[in-house]
Image (cartoon, coloured by chain):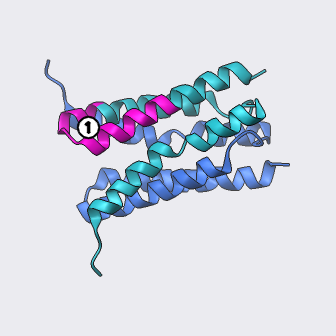
Chain colours: A blue, B cyan
Amino acid sequence: MDVNWELVGLAAAILTSMGFVPQIVKGFRTKRMDDVSSEMLLVLMLGMLLWFLYGMHLQDRIIVGANLFGVFSLLLTFVLKRRYSK
Amino acid sequence: MDVNWELVGLAAAILTSMGFVPQIVKGFRTKRMDDVSSEMLLVLMLGMLLWFLYGMHLQDRIIVGANLFGVFSLLLTFVLKRRYSK
């Protein structure tokens, strides 16, 4: 089977960087974030920050772009978590 | 500055694959997952599945291992979400 692996990698990067958007939307809508783990957000944020730096080292635009977006969306999720958690 | 980039990439892979463990622990402990977005879990699961396949293509053990672990931990998080959400 002829697979376009570039496209698979690109789709993977887009999905894992966009994944937190639904959580942000849900948080804004319900104004509740109690059940979301802060530690999860912080560990993933640090991980994606390291991926971003690793991507800078590799000069790979996809890794850089996807993880930069990921770090910022996790940061926004974390702000919502702090704001809405009781 | 002399940076061990292999180590940065490895740390990034470990953190982004382990990131859901705190959410699983929190879910088990509180038996509440209402505020966690199902769509987030599904988008990330699909993304990590594609990363896993991309890693197989690249024959990169770190990408394969980290994302396989990530897919399973997201699957477990999703099962908890279904079980505990009202």
* Circle 1 Cα neighbour tier, 10 Å, few/some/many (<14 / 14–19 / ≥20): many
Can you say whether A38 is above or below A32 in the image?
below
Can you say whether B23 is above or below B80 in the image?
below
Main structural element of the magenta stretch: helix, strand or loop?
A: helix
Can you say whether A76 is above or below A21 in the image?
below
Q: Quadrant of the N terminus of chain A?
A: top left
Q: Position of residue A51 (x, y in %)?
A: 38, 56
Apparent side of residue A86 relative to residue B73 in the rendered image (left or right): right
Observer able to see residue A7: no
Q: Position of residue A15 (x, y in %)?
A: 43, 37
* Label 1 secondary element: helix
Residue positioned most to the right: A86
Taking the spot 56% from the left edge, 51% from the top edge, the residue there is: A73
Taking the spot 50% from the left edge, 58% from the top edge, the residue there is: A46
Q: Is residue A10 magenta?
A: no
Q: Is residue B64 magenta?
A: yes
Among the 4 quarters of the image, the one containing residue B68? top left
> Subunit of mark 1?
B
Observer able to see residue A39: yes
Taking the spot 13% from the left edge, 22% from the top edge, the residue there is: A2
Residue positioned most to the left: A2
Would you name the residue on which mark 1 appears?
B55
Identity of the amino acid at label 1? Gly
Q: Position of residue B32 (x, y in %)?
A: 76, 31
Can you say whether B65 is above or below B78 in the image?
below
Region in magenta: B53-73
Among the 4 quarters of the image, the one containing residue B39? top right
Taking the spot 29% from the left edge, 45% from the top edge, the residue there is: B62
Q: Position of residue A24 (x, y in %)?
A: 65, 43
In the image, A36 versus A84, the foreground residue is A36
Apparent side of residue B31 relative to residue A71 in the rendered image (left or right): right
